[in-house]
Amino acid sequence: MTIEHVSDTARWVAVYRAMESERPDALFRDPYARGLAGAKGLEIVRSIPRGKATAWALIVRTAVFDELLLDGIEQGADTVVNLAAGLDARPWRLALPPALRWVDVDLPGILDYKLAELGGEPTRCEYHALRADLTDQDQRRRALAEATEGSARAVAVSEGLLIYLTDADVAALGRDLHATHSIVSWLTDLVSPRLLGWMQRSWGRHANRGNASFQFAPAAGTDFFEPLGWREAEYRSQWEEAHRLGRDMPMAWLWRLIGRLQSEARREEGRRMSGIVRLERVQA
């Protein structure tokens, strides 16, 4: 068994960050990724179907989140609340303002592992780690309150989290984020039901055994978040961003050719198969 717990998926993604970081033309540099992924991360990538062939999607996701986060900080965010932070090393690797408050929120095991592996390496900004189960309402609300204490303008990040939650869990999270008034934007990634089906067929057996089932892919897309107090402010199609960043999926040229023969509606469906979204608060 390779994925034994949902936290193991953080090791999986860290391998892809390491692969990208070691390229001469890397989109980002994460010098910590290889060590954080460890042998377990390599085992996961080797054992799942098309483990390396799908690296492009997670590499693109990382690069786009970097861009959106830095944009938000430049526009005045004083706090980043990183939900299900996993092995994300952005507080160590990004050029962040020293006064920025960065708060990682995740289960004790994965945060303890990350901080032990980093061995006291200094961060670029003010850093805090909060240990909490985000599916537990009381723990989640306490963590959000503590993370944003004293903040005037915070950004919430849920990279790679929502897909492992139920619709009800995502709705509860969205409502609690909206109730945390200093959080003005929410960065997340989203897949379509069609892509979710492909992921379940390809990797579902491996993920399910580790209680990391792929679940959340709302048919309504970003409209799902409107009743929770959030609306789409920016959508970055992973397909389009991959082409912009020079990290196209294998055989992308063929899919582009096929796309020219499709209806506009079908092309838009393809564009929205997966993406990175910046949600903004809807004032009550």
Image (cartoon, rainbow, N blue to C red):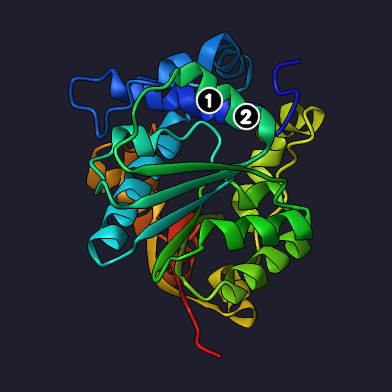
- Furthest-top residue in view? 39
- Circles 2 and 1 in contact, beta carbons < 8 Å: yes
**Badge number at residue 139:** none
> In the rendered view, does 139 fall on the left or right side of 224?
right
Q: Which residue is labeled 2 in the image? A: 110
Specify few, some or many for label 1: CA neighbours under 10 Å numbering under 14, 14-19, or 20 or more.
some
Q: Residue at x 27, y 53 (%)?
A: 70
Vertical comparison of 20 with 177: above or below: above
Specify few, some or many for label 2: CA neighbours under 10 Å numbering under 14, 14-19, or 20 or more.
many
**Badge number at residue 114:** 1
Distance Cα–Cα, label 2 vs label 1? 6 Å
Q: Tell me the kind of residue under disc 2.
A: Ile
Q: Tell me the kind of residue under disc 1.
A: Lys
226 and 31: which is toward the camera: 31
Total residue callouts: 2
- Furthest-front residue in view? 150
- Residue 67 position within the rendered picture, expressed as x and y whole percent measured from the top left: 28, 51
